[in-house]
């Protein structure tokens, strides 16, 4: 059965950042089964070549763009090329992202620039380029991948929390600005799922090891998350929260903000914080 997004946007033209692997590839392959024309971006040429073949084997059509999404001029060049080649755009998925860990005051400021450029500014760039196109044509959908981390803001991952919270704020703003033009917006806030998001980490090795271990033990695969995202987006959902832990964080923080804040502080103060973190299952 086709996704509702495919029915709503019959020309089926999508641009997906970070499409060389992980969730970006999974989203691309899910859409390819509905015969979408997909532009995928990544910094690795070999990953793009592999994704392109998989997309086309699955029934889609793929165009690849090798560049760093934190470079706005390169992003604009790729964006314009895809619009020209595909004849327009129906779906932008701001997916590219990196993960890292470390304490405030210890995490290098240069690394803040790096993670902010990819996780936050790239989403701003893509949205900046896509919104005028969508408003003009009176249709389109922007999906941005944030994280439950942007809601929970847990210790030892402030740099990641900040960028993902910014994405949530940006998408809430965009939703209000484009709704009257017939344009949809969604923000995705999952908890941990199996991915390679920590592969480019720049923080301390111990934090990276903890993060990667938690991720590899996660219950859900990129394919699981991709299907959920596209299904919920097709329903017109703005907040796409998955699984139940993400929904719990969303509601507890809003209804019991002081309790949630103090709970985090007390837990982090315990000496076994790291050991407990390693036991998480999502």
Image: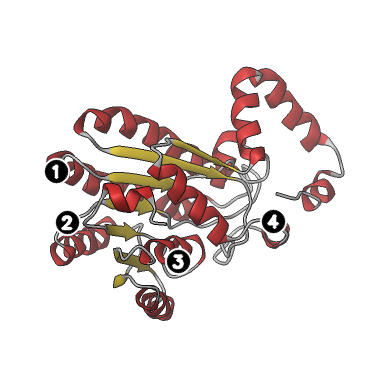
Residue 59 point in image, percent of width and height: 35, 72
**Are the residues tagged 2 and 3 within 8 Å (C-beta)?**
no
Q: Is disc 4 placed on a helix, strand or loop?
A: loop
Report the label total. 4
Residue identified by numbered label 2: 88
Residue identified by numbered label 4: 219
**Are the residues tagged 1 and 4 within 8 Å (C-beta)?**
no
Seen at 57% across and 67% down, the residue is 199
Relative to 232, say whether 10 is above or below: below
How far apart are labels 2 and 3 at the CA level?
A: 21 Å
Q: Does residue 41 appear in the picture of this structure?
A: yes
Q: Is disc 3 placed on a helix, strand or loop?
A: helix
Relative to 204, say whether 42 is above or below: below
Q: Does residue 111 appear in the picture of this structure?
A: no
Crowdedness of circle 2 by 10 Å Cα count: few (<14), some, many (20+)?
some
Crowdedness of circle 4 by 10 Å Cα count: few (<14), some, many (20+)?
few
Residue identified by numbered label 1: 137
Dividing the picture into quadrants, the one containing residue 25 is: bottom left
Front residue of 89/112: it is: 89
Residue 40 point in image, percent of width and height: 34, 66
Seen at 73% across and 32% down, the residue is 264
Q: Which mark is residue 25?
A: 3
Quadrant housing the N terminus? bottom left
Sequence-wise first label, 3 or 1: 3
Please indicate whether residue 260 sits to the left or right of residue 130 in the image.
Answer: right
Sequence-wise first label, 2 or 3: 3
How far apart are labels 2 and 4 at the CA level?
A: 37 Å
**Are the residues tagged 2 and 1 within 8 Å (C-beta)?**
yes
Q: Which mark is residue 123?
A: none
**Are the residues tagged 3 and 1 within 8 Å (C-beta)?**
no
């Amino acid at each position: 059965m086709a996704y509702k997004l495919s029915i709503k946007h019959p020309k089926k033209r999508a641009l997906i950042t970070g499409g060389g692997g992980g969730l970006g590839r999974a989203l691309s392959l899910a859409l390819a089964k509905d015969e979408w024309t997909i532009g995928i971006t990544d910094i690795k040429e070999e990953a793009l070549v592999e994704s392109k073949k998989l997309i086309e084997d699955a029934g889609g059509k793929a165009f690849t763009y090798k560049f760093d999404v934190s470079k706005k001029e390169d992003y604009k060049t790729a964006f314009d090329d895809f619009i020209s080649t595909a004849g327009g755009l129906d779906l932008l998925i701001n997916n590219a992202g990196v993960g890292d860990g470390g304490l405030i005051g210890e995490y290098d400021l240069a690394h803040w620039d790096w993670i902010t450029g990819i996780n936050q500014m790239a989403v701003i760039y893509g949205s900046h380029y896509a919104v005028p196109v969508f408003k003009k044509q009176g249709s389109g959908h922007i999906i941005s991948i944030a994280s439950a981390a942007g809601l929970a803001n847990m210790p030892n991952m402030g740099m990641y929390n900040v960028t993902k919270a910014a994405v949530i704020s940006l998408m809430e703003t965009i939703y209000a600005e484009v709704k009257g033009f017939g344009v949809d917006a969604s923000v995705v806030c999952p908890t941990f799922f199996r991915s390679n998001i920590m592969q480019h980490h720049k923080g301390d090795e111990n934090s990276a090891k903890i993060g990667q271990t938690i991720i590899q033990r996660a219950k859900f695969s990129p394919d699981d998350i991709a299907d959920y995202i596209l299904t919920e987006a097709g329903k017109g959902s703005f907040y796409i929260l998955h699984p139940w832990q993400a929904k719990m964080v969303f509601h507890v923080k809003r209804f019991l903000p002081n309790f949630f804040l103090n709970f985090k502080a007390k837990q982090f103060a315990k000496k076994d914080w790291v050991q407990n973190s390693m036991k998480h299952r999502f």
